[in-house]
Amino acid sequence: MCLTSYYFTTTYYIFFRQDIVNRAQERCYYLTFFPARHILAFYDYFTSEKLDKENEEECKTLIRFVNSKAQLPSREAFQGISHGSKDYLEILCKIGNGLKRNFKDVLKQTRNINAVEQHVKSDIL
């Protein structure tokens, strides 16, 4: 394969992958918490036939970043995801819906925001 053809194929794949992730984020709110590369880490975790411990740890960290009380769902909870399916949008939406169920079961964390009660002269007319 010539370099130009390789470059075109690789570029096309990157744009194709980003488009699928964008469409999945439009459909599944809980996927918007994560950038594309993290969503694809979840994809790898839930669709791989063999567990990759490094990938599992990364996904645990991503879940805890959103809510420290949340746990990474088990791979068995996502058994409806076919390992051989090429409908990536459907798979990502299933992952998004699974994350939604996961986060809904966890108590919401409230954070206090300390507002500074100081006015700036440009704010006063």
Image (cartoon, grey):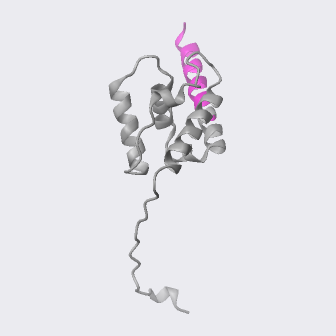
- Residue drawn where x is 41% and y is 47% of the image: 70
> Image quadrant of residue 100?
top right
Residue 122 location in percent, x, y?
A: 49, 86
Residue 77 location in percent, x, y?
A: 51, 31
Inspect the magenta stretch and tell me whether residue 7 lies in it: yes
Q: Which residues are drawn in magenta?
A: 1-19
5 in relation to 109, above or below = above
Report the front residue among 32 and 91: 91
In which quadrant is the N terminus drawn? top right
- Residue drawn where x is 58% and y is 29% of the image: 17
61 in relation to 79, above or below = below
**In the shown orientation, is residue 72 left or right of residue 12?**
left
- Residue drawn where x is 56% and y is 35% of the image: 95
In which quadrant is the C terminus drawn? bottom right
- Residue drawn where x is 66% and y is 42% of the image: 27
The main secondary structure of the magenta stretch is helix
